[in-house]
Amino acid sequence: MTEPPKEGIKYIDSKVHLPYHYVAGDYKARYLSALKDKRILGSKCSKTGKVFVPPLVASPESFAPCNEFVEVAGRGVITTFCVVNIPVIGRELDIPYVAASVALDGADISIFALIQECKPEDVRMGMRVEAVWKPDGERHGDHEDIQYFRPTGEPDAPRESYINRL
Amino acid sequence: MTKLRNVAVVGFAQLPVVARDEHRMSTEMLYPVVRQALADCGVERDAIDYQIAGSVDYMDGRPFGFVAALDVMGSWPARQDLHLEMDAAFCAYYAWVRMQAGDCDTAIVAGHGKTSEGEPDRVLNLQLDPYYQAAIGLDPTSTAALQASAYMARTGATDRDFAAVAARNRAAGARNPDNQLRRAASADELVKTPWAVQPLRQGYLPPIGESASCMILAAEGKAEKLCDRPVWIHGVDHRTELQTLGARDLSRSAGTQLAAQKALAMAGVQSAAAADVVELYANTPAEELIVGEALGIDPKAAQPAINPSGGALCANPVMSTGLIRMGEIFRQLSGRAGARSVSGARRGIAHATQGHCLQQNIVWVLGTERRWT
């Protein structure tokens, strides 16, 4: 027999159900809790002083522990960005929209951020932006607490201020 | 036997095994043990050439989650790294092979995974074929029970025999501060525990537990500088059996038997009975008896000591359990085993397994002296 039978079962459908109950970890839990108070926490490398947001227990770069929590600003600078013209899974966004890396003031690495309240063609490296938070009472300690970032209208940051935080 | 490069275990660290660490993600558990293993060797991360880790993405619920381990293993500047979806005892084999090839002298071998975040029975069901074995809902306890039943049918072993094996592990395990179960339990007590899946009782199975582990391996020339009492690899072999359970004789472990023959031959040792101590990765008493038989050791003999750590029945942090067997032999042979020390131990065997019904098996022969001169 070289071909599958014309009658009968040719395919098997299978559903895989794997539930998880993740531990956030004390560092992430502290970071998420602070979002409820419109505060953004990072952790500082004990060897290099670099600040990581969200906080990490150890510096991926130096391998040293990050023992100190520091608060960073809810505003910063766009280090790099892209203009998205394809629909995104899981979020309702009008396209095109801008996804950017934002280096928050006081942080040594960037976070990923959505940029709104401006035209995509106006976005540029060095543009100053700030977090737009969900209203009081609607923040639950998750990444949705920051709705998006928007331009502050401040003068652009000089290139050397962010070129090492891409 | 061809002369091979002498490679030694020079450091080992693990977290005490717990049911659930509420404070740390998997990689956050791994970080301190990598630091500890390096600190025990008195070196910084830059002193080590190569790194390899074992974890299961499905267990962690993080597709490609293994790459997160890079962030806590000191992986910068860019390193040579490998990952196995296997217990870290198998990772150690790959590091050893790299050293035989001569392209590295030192390696970090790590195992990590949070067994408590998902449902291990559901995850391990997916190891089976999706058309039949997985589809009918076989889980690892059920397949282990099939194996136990097959072993009883062939050998005449009884429920009482299983209880005795579990009780010996529990008695030994009470002396191991890293264990999840640290209370001794008698055969009389265990034989009265309810059935999990008959013929396996709840008292014959390990609790779900999690940990992280890290071993440092080093070749001759480096090993002596990293450790006061390096424990040398004399022989190793690993074998994989068929996935189709019905195509194997479940009452035996042909893979362990062959791996043991090859590893002992490499070590230049006649039989496993010449070892002072063995550590077996057995998820059930039946597995321990099957593996012991395949190795050729007599559980009633005075030598070797079997599972002075308490074995997997007292602590089974998936992805680390096998590496811990190797780590235990290192501890025994290097004077680091504390209250569970086997007096005068100079040669040991570590066994690790993975998969349903002992599908994959690795056997390590370790000793206090260099194998090749």
Image: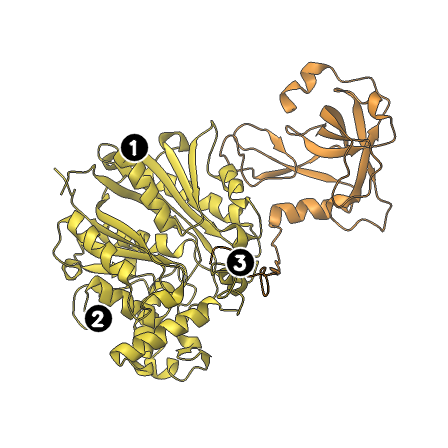
Chain to which the residue tagged by mark 1 belongs: B
Discs 1/3, front = 3
Image spot of residue A133 (x, y percent): 83, 40
Please check whether the numbered discs 3 and 2 fall on a single chain. Answer: no
The residue that mark 2 highlights is B299
Q: Which of marks 2 and 1 is nearer the N terminus?
A: 1
Q: Among the chains, which one is yellow?
A: B
Alpha carbon separation for disc pair 1 and 3: 53 Å
Mark linked to residue B302: none
Q: Residue at left 55%, top 45%?
A: B65
The amino acid type of the residue labelled 3 equals Pro
Q: How crowded is the residue under tag 2: few (<14 C-alpha within 10 Å), some, or many (20+)?
A: some
Chain to which the residue tagged by mark 3 belongs: A
Image spot of residue B124 (x, y percent): 49, 61
Image spot of residue B139 (x, y percent): 48, 67
Please check whether the numbered discs 1 and 3 fall on a single chain. Answer: no
Q: In this view, does B262 lie above or below A17?
A: above
The amino acid type of the residue labelled 2 equals Pro
The residue that mark 1 highlights is B105
The residue that mark 3 highlights is A4
Q: Among the chains, which one is orange?
A: A
The amino acid type of the residue labelled 1 equals Asp
Tell me the SS state at disc 2.
loop
Q: In this view, does A125 lie to the left or right of B51?
A: right
Near-viewer residue (B78 or B336): B78
Q: Is residue B189 above or below residue B298?
A: below
